[in-house]
Image (cartoon, grey):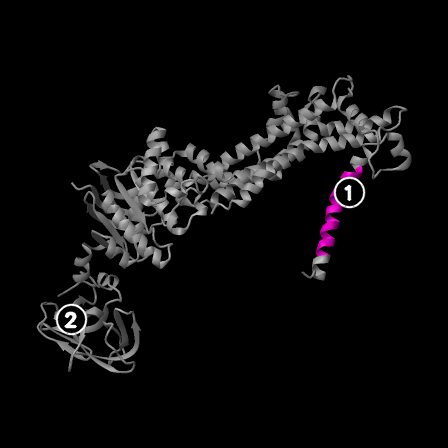
Amino acid sequence: MKIKPLQIIAHIILILGVLLMVVPIWISFASSSHDSVTILTEGMKFHIGDQLARNYNEVLNEKGGWSEEVTAAKMFINSFIMALGIATLKVVISAMSAYALVYYRFKLAVPIFWLIFITLLVPLEVRIFPSYKIVSDLGLTNSYTGLILPLVASATATFFFRQFYKTIPDELLESAKLDGANAWSFFIDFLVPLSKTMIAAMFIFMFVYGYSQYLWPLIMTTAEEYWTVVMGMKIIYTESYEGVALPRTAERFAYIILSMIPPVLVVVFLQKWFIKGLIQTEK
Amino acid sequence: MSFLDLKNVTKIYPNGTKAVHETSLSVDEGEFMVFVGPSGCGKSTLLRMVAGLEDITEGDINLDGKLMNEVDPSERDVAMVFQNYALYPHMNVYNNLAYGLKNRGIDKETIEQKVNDAAKLLQISDYLQRKPSMLSGGQRQRVAMGRAIVRNPKIFLFDEPLSNLDAKLRIQMRLEIKKLQQKVGVTSIFVTHDQVEAMTLADRLAVINNGIIEQLGTPIEIYDNPKSLFVAGFIGSPQMNFLDGNLKNKTLSAEGFEIKDIDSDFEGEVTLGIRPEHLSQSENALISLKVELVEQLGSDNLVYGQLKNKKDFCYRCPGNQTIEKGSNLSLNIENNKYYIFDKSTGKRVN
């Protein structure tokens, strides 16, 4: 088979793209396996050093913060709980509200949909004071509920589910009705399995969204036991200015690498569903 | 009261379109009723009202002695086969059949028994574990019917179920549906725009046009004795020939010929209808046809041509006759089988 010049160019572009994505991660990982002094004196590393286990062990288990009590491991768990809660509830709530908007023919369905859609223009950062006021009045500061609840409504996901439900042929609903399905069983037996891939995709996006939240947990949590990974990253960075000690660059890299693992795991795990859904063309 | 009774059923859509006009109809138990008509004539709407998928604007629908107007579709005990089958794409064939039974709270063993029986009847036992996307058109059709049969409903409703199949399969499935209906003996309503399907399947036929039942009867009654211009034109293939004429003193004068002693007192502008198969060749006959095209179907020849007044005309003759293109045929109407319709109202007058 002859390789055309166009293919070579295409491959070069693709390879460059891959390098652009992978190289920074590799440098971070390689650098996290040296000690900080080496990195500070010699710059970032491309090869694996001998401090891998020590650095990661230090990052995970060292007690930090003002009270010297919270560990990175605890922050990972917090972030994971928060992201999981946000993603799950977002998917459930969006799917159900889209179901109501598409299948219940009430007069206000369209205005209500646009009302939901407009909330895209008002992200949490814009309404952070009223949101904080409400959550604190409810006594939910420093709790997982407080971290999750204000972020669970999603216009984007509602929009995507709505568009998907609209493509499902009416006959399916009618046929299900004649087969004795009620509103609830149509949702559970038909829409949920049919939108499996949608659910997986939304879950991934929303998980990453929840995981990378910074401002909300920063404002919401005063107790260190509710700190999240993204907050921790900032804390580790500022640490170096405080004392006379050397900046702990190697540990920072280790922390960054660790912080990427939960979202990557979610993507890897749900990708199976994703691909399964893509191969079995439903109609 | 018969098994299914429609009384002055009317459907007006919210936008004001009147889809069905005060239609009354009875279907006996075990009967195979076919609604036939052009697209948009209201036949599907009527069927969907029986199923409960459309609200009834006015009138009553009674099924097995019970008023159905306000009854939810799931409670009506009707089964419907849709045009695109509407199989559940994420369930395998077994679950497609079993879903309706599960919703009725039937126990697992009975469901398995019923599904297997239906599968055997429809010869789909080998595909029970497959998803609908892995089935051919004919197999999907069978699954759709299986889903209806398995529930043992009071009435089967078919909404143009054969129109997605290729010609050969359509004929085969048509036969199977008829056989199956006779075997199972369930009252059925079948909606189609295909008059051949309608003629072959129906015990009784309702020809629908513009939301009105134009004529109701057995297929042969309707073929032999169409009551209106629309029915005459719709039923029969190739289509009936229509010629303009004038009726006066029991004499019809069409363009180029006259027919005397007509059994009608109507006077005025009429349309004369003659079926292509009710003609025969003879010397010095009424109609003179200049042949333009011959379609040889094997058993029959369809001869298309023009009359003296350039009017298109069709004649059907046995396949063993050779007819030359460009020749002139002289045709007679067999056994006075012609139909005369009032030109303004379309009603039959002879």
The chain holding disc 2 is B
Looking at the image, residue B246 lies above or below residue B62:
below
Looking at the image, residue B69 lies above or below residue A11:
above
What residue is shown with label 2?
B268
Decide if residue B55 is in sight here. Answer: no
Q: Nearer the viewer, residue A188 or B105?
A: B105
Position of residue A77 measured from the top left corner of the image (x, y, whole percent): 67, 24
Task: Work out whether disc 1 and disc 2 sit on a shared chain.
Answer: no
Within-10-Å neighbours for mark 2: few <14, some 14–19, many 20+:
few
What residue is shown with label 1?
A23
First to last magenta residue range: A9-27
Q: Nearer the viewer, residue A268 or B274?
A: A268
Q: SS of the residue at dot 1?
A: helix
Q: SS of the residue at dot 2?
A: strand
Under mark 2, the amino acid is Gly
Q: Residue at x 15, y 68 (%)?
A: B337
Position of residue B52 measured from the top left corner of the image (x, y, whole percent): 31, 41
Figure quadrant of residue B233: bottom left
